[in-house]
């Protein structure tokens, strides 16, 4: 209770900044022209009902449909709806960071743009946030994804919790509300492959959860293929753990030890029983096996080196191509 009260005082002090509004909603969106009308309508209704000053920030990039044109129309009808368009294809997490950088809310809601996150549940998140928590994320009542996708999600969380060097809650659900000071801390990170949900947990501010609905995508198809999910899982692991390096070192030590015992066995059989060691099939199997292990080890090391290489380039995280609506300057 003491922590919550202290945080509530800090949140209240932030509100003294006249440049801030009550709540921002950041939504990364791509090729969702069929869903946008209902999404924007429901957002407008719920945010108006909450009687808060608000802004909705859509972040998009290159679309094959009329998503960006429709976002312009939505802004023309309600200037609280704004958009930033990035100049090239960006990941969901980079889009979220771009939206956070230009947000002006004392509190910021992050949600997906496919209506699997219910806009009406923003009320639940905000009410819990008002108790003084810095981060409140939604726990889905049930998973509406396929059994295979659910299995992959659970396996990923189990794996990442065992591999992480730090105690981190790797809740992969993007739907959450965060305080302004959480946004400010996130903005200090300049990683080229940001895992925003994990970074929020890494920051360590007081966190709570609420039960939210799990919607079903009515139109279009998910942008998260299995391959993209695997890439995201690899990125999470390499961003928050060095254990893969330790594991391959341990495996190398075990194989070296086994090889030594095998050598001792061969020498013993030759000296005591005058037996010849196994022939070339054994040699071929051992060479190919250890060669495969070495390539895997080099691949893991290469992934870390590749990320170091990209970080040292210090390229911009994203480039804004166009803005729709009045948005805070990224550098302020």
Image (spheres, grey):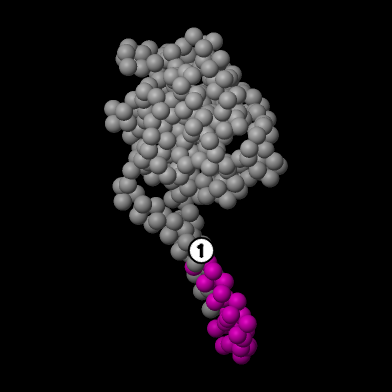
> How dense is the environment of label 1, judged by Cα within 10 Å: few (below 14), some, or many (20 and up)?
few
Q: Quadrant of the C terminus?
A: top left
Left or right: residue 130 compared with residue 188: right
**Which percent across, then down, holds residue 28?**
49, 33
Residue interval drawn in magenta: 265-294
- Which secondary structure is most common in the magenta stretch? helix
* Front-lying residue, 236 or 276: 236
Left or right: residue 294 compared with residue 321: right
Q: Quadrant of residue 155?
A: top right
Q: Quadrant of residue 213?
A: top right
Q: Is residue 261 visible?
A: no
How many numbered circles does the render carry? 1
Per the image, the residue denoted by label 1 is 296
Q: Residue at x 32, y 17 (%)?
A: 19
* Front-lying residue, 127 or 110: 110
Q: Residue furthest left?
A: 332
Left or right: residue 306 compared with residue 256: left
């Amino acid at each position: 209770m003491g922590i919550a009260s202290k945080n509530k005082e800090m949140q209240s002090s932030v509100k003294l900044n006249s440049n801030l509004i009550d709540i921002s909603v950041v939504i990364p969106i791509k090729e969702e022209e069929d869903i946008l009308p209902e999404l924007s309508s429901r957002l407008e209704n719920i945010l108006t009902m909450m009687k808060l000053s608000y802004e909705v920030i859509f972040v998009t990039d290159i679309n094959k449909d009329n998503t960006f044109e429709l976002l312009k129309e939505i802004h023309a009808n309600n200037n609280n709806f704004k958009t930033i368009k990035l100049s090239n294809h960006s990941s969901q997490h980079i889009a979220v960071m771009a939206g956070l950088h230009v947000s002006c809310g004392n509190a910021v809601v992050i949600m997906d743009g496919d209506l699997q996150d219910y806009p009406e549940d923003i009320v639940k998140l905000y009410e819990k946030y008002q108790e003084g928590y810095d981060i409140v994320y939604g726990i889905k009542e049930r998973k509406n994804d396929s059994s295979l996708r659910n299995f992959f999600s659970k396996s990923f969380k189990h794996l990442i919790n065992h591999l992480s060097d730090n105690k981190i809650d790797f809740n992969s659900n993007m739907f959450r509300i965060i305080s302004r000071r959480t946004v400010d801390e996130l903005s200090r990170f300049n990683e080229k492959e940001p895992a925003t949900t994990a970074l929020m947990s890494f920051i360590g501010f007081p966190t709570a959860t609420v039960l939210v609905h799990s919607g079903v995508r009515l139109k279009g198809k998910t942008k998260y293929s299995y391959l993209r999910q695997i890439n995201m899982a690899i990125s999470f692991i390499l961003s928050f753990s060095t254990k893969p390096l330790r594991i391959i070192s341990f495996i190398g030590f075990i194989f070296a030890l086994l090889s030594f015992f095998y050598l001792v066995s061969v020498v013993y059989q030759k000296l005591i029983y005058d037996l010849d060691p196994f022939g070339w099939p054994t040699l071929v199997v051992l060479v190919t096996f250890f060669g495969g292990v070495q390539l895997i080890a080099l691949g893991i090391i290469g992934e870390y080196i590749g990320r170091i290489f990209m970080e040292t380039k210090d390229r911009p995280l994203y480039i804004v191509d166009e803005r729709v609506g009045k948005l805070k300057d990224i550098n302020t």
